[in-house]
Structure formats: C-alpha cells, structure tokens
Image: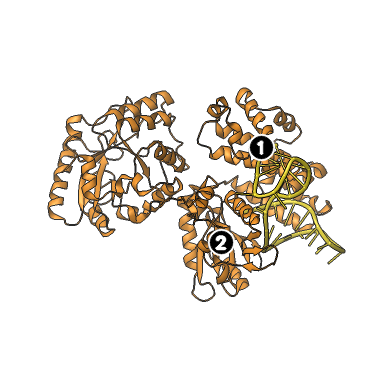
DNA sequence: GCCGTTTTCGGCCCGACTGTTTTCAGTCG
C-alpha cells in the first residue's frame, strides 16, 4: 500500500466512526493522522522498516499498529468489522449540502435511507418531516440539495486555474469603493493549493448586512445557501461554492489570517495563543483573564504578537512553518519579481499563436532579460514540430532578431521530444548548435513505469540537454501523471546536472509543490517557465511561482532568476 | 485516539448560520 491508500482507509475509518456517533476526538485523531500521512514525503513502507512511524504527527500507539497492519495485509480488523455495519453508499448522502453524519444516521435508522435515490424518495414522500427534530423546511432543503447532487454527481475539487480567475472576477464586481471598500481572496486559493474546494472571500464594509445582500444578488449566482449578518454563501457559475465574510477595517488582518487557513495551521496557532493566555479567533486575540479583545488590521502584527515571524500564506500547512517562524528561520521565498526570463516559450513556427518577435517584445515589456524560443521538434506533428531544416532556419531568424532588437536576448532552443526509447528527436550535431535544449515526453504516454523511467533517464544522460519540461505530464481533468519512478528520475537529474521545470500552465502545474520540494531538498535546480503560446500566457508565471513558494523555494534554487550573463555562463554560450 | 514549557489524565480551536428550537444540535469552514 502507498501513503495515499493508507490515508484513504484512515479517512474512511473516521467517517464510519462519525456516522456511528463515536467520540468526536477519536474521529478527529484519525482524520489528523490521515492528513499528515497524505502530505508525507517519505514512503510509509520505508518509515515502517526504520521503525519511525510514531514520529508522524498524529500517529500514536493505536494508529501506528493499524498502519503496520495495513502495510502487511492491505486493511485492518477494526475497519473491516465496522464496514459491514454501515450501508455502502452512505457517502452519497453526506455529500448532500446540509446533511452531515448525524442526520444521515437518523435518516438511515428511522427511514432506512441508504443512498441518494432513497433520500430523494423519502423527501418526495414527505417522510423526513415526521422525524423528531426535523421539519418541513429541512425536507424542502434536502430535496433541492439532493436533486442538485443527483444532477451533477460529486463535483469535488476545482483546479486552481479555474477557481482563481472566478474569484478575481467576483472581487472586481463587488468592490465599489463605498459599500465594499476592499475584497481579498483567502482560503486555499491564497495558499496557491493546486486544487480548491471552494472560493473564500473576505471584505471590508461598515454595513455588513447590505454588503452580504449585494453579494447574494450578483449575476451568475445560481443559489443562495446562507445569508446572515456577517457571512453569506452561494453557489456560483461552474457550480463552485463561494463564501463571503465581512468585517470592519480594524480586524481585517485577523479575519484574513483566519480564513486563509489551513485548518491545521490555525489549530496550532490557537494552541500557541492559549499557552500565552490568549484566545485566538477571526476577531483577533483576546486576553483570557481580562477579556480584552485585540483585533489586528494586518496579519503581520498578529503573528508578531504570538512571537512568530510572519508566515507567507503558501507555507501555512502545518509542515514545520510554525516551528521555523518561532526561530525566525522562514526563508525569503521566490517572488515573481525575481524571475528574469522564461526558458520555455513557443512561437507560430510550431503551435504558438505569435511570431518570435512578438513574443520577445512582450517579454521585454515585462522586464525580462531573456527568453528561450523552444518550438516543438519534428515528431510532434499535431504541434507542427520543426523538421531539421526548419530548425536551422529558426536559429537563423533568431540570430537576425537578436541583431535588430535591443533590451532582450532571444535564446535559440527546442522543446525536443523524448522518443519512446529515450533517444531524442534531433541528433547531437543539431542540438549542440542550440543555446538551450528543453526535453519532454509527448507521445507514447501509456508506457509502464519501468519503461517510462528508463526513457526519461536516458534522455537526461544526453550532454546537450538542459531542462526536463513538465516532468510528470499530468493535466488537470485530462491526463494522470505518467507511470514513472520520480525518485530515480530526480537522482539522474542530480547526477547529470539537469534542471527540472515547474511548468506554470494552470492546466499542468508540473512539477507540483510536493515534487518541487523533493527536488529542491535533493539539491536539484529548478526552472519556472510558462510554456507560453501567446503573450498573454506570460502572466501564468504567477501559478508557477505560487507552486514554488509552496515548496519553500528560494531565488537561488531557480535558474531563471539568474541575470543574462550568469545564465549564459551556466548554459556555456557566449 | 493523541499528547505534554502547569498535565501520563483530562483535556482536545473557534464561531456563524440554520432550523426547530424555548436553549441548542448539527453542519460547515
């Protein structure tokens, strides 16, 4: 079993205990252990051999034994015993908005509701209103929510690249300078998590109720879930849930901190506060003894008051950032302003939309010192890959442009296909004439792990190769990562001095945050590129930088923070 | 079930909103 499978079983265990009405702290213990295992970098099997399982936060004696059992047998007794007492599809019911485990349990024991169909039937036949503690309103809400659930299926999480633009669109709409002075995106979007469950917004207003009213009346609101005096919640277009909290200026920082999360980060902060005799909530810090409330207009002050260095949102996952902040050891993370050029860019010579010149001028306007034009190689027919002859013409054109354009250096490059057997699409004689060689897997993506790993490692052995682009090949909602042994590939990258890309395209984010952290800790250099096919796509750099920041990446870890001179030295070109 | 800068037992983060309630449980984030 791998880490994800173990975590899944622990989550299911928690879920079943919850359904049964078990002690809530026991349930939380299972969830906490599962969360930490999910985020773990090391393989549980390896940790188990080293007898190191108990060092995982949230894993004590009992859960440690269950993990060992799982690694040996693929499951554990307590889980199997409980599983048989619970209807199989019960999660369909708790997935319905407003129904949690306790209500699901009531529906099951009182009405025999076992799945979504049964729930719909019970609501339509007005049987729900007869349960003590439930009423007509509840029944109506269940009916609406269950029908929506039935129509859409389980939507789950949204890619950041979908959620962030929607969040920005809503923010722009709402800020009018009078009723609503400021809107900030919080939650997992602000932490640049690669997928998000919903959109969390916070806003400043002196008239909270009117502001919430305006929020629920926006265009594209499909349904209002909640409408209170400080909080509103709606279903917006694309069926994404949007939550809005409103405060006055003086506690804006406290609220922003609270709603940025993560949950684990906040829980730990509150415990630190309690140890200092302070009580932390979205309204700021409160002295437990005197009851004096201290709201903060900026997050920095609140962290300072807790004796902590400011922690950037991307790090707030309870993965050691709080301990680092106590010792003032949070590093200066990479920022968009550190990026001095883009090393993976397409033009209309292959599947890009613009000329090389247009791309170069757009990059110059962003303040970049250099840009590598890396059009596709010949075997990428769909992407109009360049034949060897066209590639040489491409190099000539770039030479001429460099002679005529000031203020930016265009590097001649390629995004060369790694063929199924690991050889490259162009011969060494051609590759050595280029300034920069980016390689990537495009075709034959269904290979087994052993073949794919060998294929990529073989490509990395080539002395002319500089960068491996979008290493895992995953695309949100379209393609899973290749079957491959990432550890071996990283070891090869390290050995042969190759750079791994963080591809900033919101469909990719590849390497992702976890792999980027792994690479950085091994000492592998990274490149944060956009893979832009038109000038507007240069703006995607923020996704790559956000992903890198989640991995604690510093400017020195990234080759395209080098200035032109240093970069040329690295590439061995004049 | 986990955990310890008051604790190896007795705590365990905090608050808004809703519905069905005369004081609160369940859900959600």
User: Residue A458: which numbered mark, if any?
Assistant: none
Residue A489 in picture, x, y percent from top left: 38, 30
**Gap between marks 1 and 2, in whole Å?**
39 Å
Q: Determine whether A399 is above or below A73 in the image.
A: below
Q: Nearer the viewer, residue A499 or A225?
A: A499
Splitting the image into 4 quarters, where does residue A539 fall? bottom left
Which colour denotes chain B? yellow
- In the drawing, does residue A201 fall left or right of residue A573? right
- In the drawing, does residue A477 fall left or right of residue A289? left
Residue A198 in picture, x, y percent from top left: 56, 53
Q: Secondary structure at mark 1?
A: helix
Splitting the image into 4 quarters, where does residue A242 fall? bottom right
| Quarter occupied by the C terminus of chain A | top left
Q: Secondary structure at mark 2?
A: helix
- Determine the residue positioned at 65% across, 26% down: A69
Q: Earlier in the sequence, mark 1 or mark 2?
A: 1
> Which residue is under mark 2?
A305
Circles 1 and 2 on the same chain:
yes
Splitting the image into 4 quarters, where does residue A207 fall? bottom right
Mark 1 closeness class: few <14, some 14–19, many ≥20 residues within 10 Å: some
Residue A174 in picture, x, y percent from top left: 51, 68
| Quarter occupied by the N terminus of chain A | top right
> Which residue is under mark 1?
A12
Q: Visible in this render: residue A134?
A: no
Mark 2 closeness class: few <14, some 14–19, many ≥20 residues within 10 Å: few
Q: Name the subunit of mark 1.
A: A
Q: Nearer the viewer, residue A139 or A161?
A: A161
- Determine the residue positioned at 28% across, 27% down: A423
Q: Nearer the viewer, residue A122 or A301?
A: A301
Which colour denotes chain A? orange
């Amino acid at each position: 079993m791998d880490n994800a499978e173990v975590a899944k079983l622990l989550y299911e265990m928690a879920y079943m205990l919850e359904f049964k009405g078990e002690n809530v702290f026991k349930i939380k213990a299972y969830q906490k252990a599962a969360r930490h295992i999910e985020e773990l970098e090391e393989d549980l099997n390896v940790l188990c051999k080293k007898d190191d399982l108990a060092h995982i936060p949230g894993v004590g004696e009992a859960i440690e034994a269950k993990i060992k059992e799982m690694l040996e047998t693929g499951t554990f007794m307590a889980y199997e015993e409980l599983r048989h007492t619970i209807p199989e599809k019960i999660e369909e019911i708790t997935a319905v908005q407003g129904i949690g485990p306790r209500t699901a349990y009531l529906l099951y024991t009182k009405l025999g509701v076992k799945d979504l169909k049964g729930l719909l039937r019970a609501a339509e036949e007005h049987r729900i209103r007869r349960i003590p503690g439930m009423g007509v309103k509840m029944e109506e809400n269940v009916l609406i929510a269950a029908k929506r659930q039935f129509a859409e299926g389980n939507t789950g999480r949204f890619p950041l690249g979908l959620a962030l633009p929607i969040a920005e669109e809503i923010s722009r709409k709402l800020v009018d300078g009078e009723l609503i002075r400021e809107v900030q995106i919080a939650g997992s979007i602000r932490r640049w998590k690669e997928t998000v469950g919903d959109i969390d917004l916070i806003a400043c207003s002196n008239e909270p109720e009117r502001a919430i009213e305006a929020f629920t009346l926006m265009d594209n609101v499909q349904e209002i879930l909640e409408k209170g005096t400080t909080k509103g919640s709606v279903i917006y277009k694309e069926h994404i849930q949007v939550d809005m909290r409103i405060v006055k200026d003086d506690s804006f920082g406290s609220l922003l901190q609270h709603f940025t999360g993560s949950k684990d980060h906040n829980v730990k902060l509150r415990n630190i506060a309690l140890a200092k005799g302070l009580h932390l909530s979205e309204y700021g810090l409160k002295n437990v003894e005197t009851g004096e409330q201290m709201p903060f207009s900026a997050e920095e002050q609140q962290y300072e008051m807790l004796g902590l260095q400011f922690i950037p949102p991307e790090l707030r996952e309870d993965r050691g950032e709080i301990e680092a902040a106590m010792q003032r050891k949070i590093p200066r993370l990479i920022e968009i302003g550190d990026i001095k050029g883009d090393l993976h860019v397409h033009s209309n010579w292959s599947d890009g939309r613009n000329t090389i010149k247009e791309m170069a001028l757009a990059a110059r306007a962003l303040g970049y010192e250099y840009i590598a034009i890396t059009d596709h190689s010949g075997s990428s027919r769909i992407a109009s890959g360049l034949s060897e002859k066209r590639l040489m013409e491409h190099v000539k054109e770039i030479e001429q442009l460099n002679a005529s354009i000031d203020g930016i250096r265009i590097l001649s490059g390629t995004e060369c296909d790694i063929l199924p057997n690991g050889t490259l699409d162009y011969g060494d004689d051609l590759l050595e004439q280029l300034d920069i060689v980016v390689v990537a897997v495009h075709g034959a993506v269904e290979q087994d792990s052993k073949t794919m790993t060998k294929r990529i490692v073989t490509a990395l052995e080539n002395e002319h190769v500089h960068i491996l682009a979008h290493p895992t090949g995953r695309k949100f909602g379209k393609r899973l990562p290749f079957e491959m042994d990432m550890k071996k590939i990283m070891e090869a990258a390290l050995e042969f001095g190759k750079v791994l890309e963080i591809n900033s395209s919101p469909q990719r984010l590849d390497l992702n945050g976890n792999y980027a952290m792994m690479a950085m800790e091994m000492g592998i250099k990274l490149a944060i590129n956009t893979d832009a096919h038109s000038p507007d796509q240069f703006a995607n750099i923020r996704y790559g930088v956000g992903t890198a920041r989640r991995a604690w990446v510093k400017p020195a870890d990234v080759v395209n923070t080098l200035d032109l001179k240093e970069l040329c030295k690295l590439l061995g070109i004049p």
